[in-house]
Image (spheres, rainbow, N blue to C red):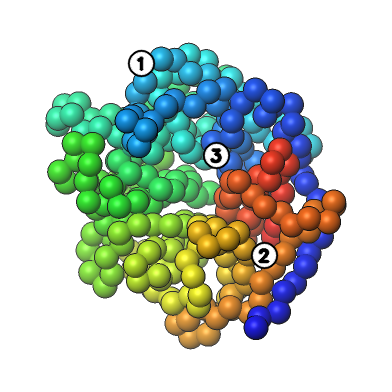
Amino acid sequence: MKSTLKIPITPIANLHEELKHATPLSIAIGHHNDVLVLLAEEQPPLINGMFPATVTEKSYNYQVIHLKDGQKTVLHLSEEKWNYHYVQPIDDGHILLVCARSYYHDAQNIEENARVYDKNGHLIRSFCLGDGIEHVYVTKDQEIWTGYFDEGVFGNYGWEEPVGRSGLVGWDASGRKMDSLEEDREYSIFECLALNGVADGGIWFFFSIEAKIGVRKEGQTLYYSPEGMGFRSFAVNGETVVAYRDRWGRSLFELQREGDEYKTVREIELIKPDGTNVEPQLVNNRENVLLFLDGDELYLYEA
C-alpha cells in the first residue's frame, strides 16, 4: 500500500460570476505564470447525439478569460460558428482556439480548425491541424503539438489519410507540419491520452494500449513504462512525474523514474480550505505545473 500525502491548497481564482451564464470548455496554463479559460454561453449539440459538429448553422458566443498577476481580462468572441474545444497561448499575446474535429471534403476544401485571435478578438490566421484531436499544446518556442484519439488516427469525417495517423504531430506557429511519429515504428499510438512539454526536454506524451510515456526530442523518441493505470494529465520535474488519473476515479500520483520505468511512490490528495479534496472537472498541465478547475475555483499544483 503506497503512502498518501495530503497537501493543503488554496484557489488562485474564483469564476463564480463568469460561470453563472457559461460553461467551461477548456483551461490552459500560459507561458508567463498566467491562466486561460475558454467558456461558451451555450454548447453546440452533438450530431445524432454522438458526434461534435465543426462549423455550426447557429452562431454561438465564447469568452476567453485571461488571469495574470491577480488581474482578470475577458476576450469576447460573439456570433462564432466554429465549435471550439481547446485554448492555448500563442505568439506571446495571442490566443489559439482549436476545434477537435475537421472535415476533409476534398483536396480544395479542408476545414481549418485552428484559429488564432489577437487580444481584441480579431482573427489573425487559420489552418488545419487534422481531425480527432485529443490534446493541443503550444511550447514557449511557439511549436504546436497535437495528440489524437482513435478517429483521428484511423480516419473519419472524410479523412482517408488522416493527418494524425501517427498519433502525435508537431507544427510551427503557422500550421506547417514539422514532425510526427510516422517513421517511428516501435509502437502504434491509437490514442494520445496526455501531452506536455518540458523546457529543453522535448515533448512528452502518454498513449493507450501499450501504456507508455514517450519523450520526443530532436526527431528521436524514448519510451518509459509507468506503473499503474493510465492518466489524462501530468507534470514533469526532473525524474519525477505527477500524474492525474480520472478513468477509474479521480486521483493524483507521484512517480519516480528507475531506468526505463516510472514507479509509483505515493498518492497525493489536494485538500481545499473547506477540508474536502480537489475534485476537478477540467485539468491541464505545462511543464511541472498542473491546473485544476473544481466547480468555479481554479487551483495550481507545482510538482
Please report whichever mark, 3 or 2, sits nearer to the chain's N-terminal start. Answer: 3
Residue drawn at point x = 66 percent, y = 81 percent: 2
Image quadrant for the C terminus?
Answer: bottom right
Which label lies toward us, 3 or 2?
3
What residue is shown with label 1? 57
Q: Amino acid at mark 2?
A: Ala
Residue 251 image point, x, y percent: 62, 63
Residue drawn at point x = 58 percent, y = 78 percent: 264
Image quadrant for the N terminus?
Answer: bottom right
Q: Secondary structure at mark 3?
A: strand
Circle count: 3
> Residues under labels 3 and 1: Cα distance?
22 Å
> Residues under labels 3 and 2: Cα distance?
21 Å
Q: Secondary structure at mark 2?
A: loop
Q: Amino acid at mark 1?
A: Glu
Residue extending furthest toward the bottom: 259
Whether residue 215 sits left or right of residue 278 in the image: it is left
Residue 135 image point, x, y percent: 44, 48
Mark sitting on residue 26: 3
Mark 3 closeness class: few <14, some 14–19, many ≥20 residues within 10 Å: many
Q: Amino acid at mark 3?
A: Ser
Whether residue 124 sits left or right of residue 284 in the image: it is left
Q: Is residue 283 above or below residue 201?
A: above
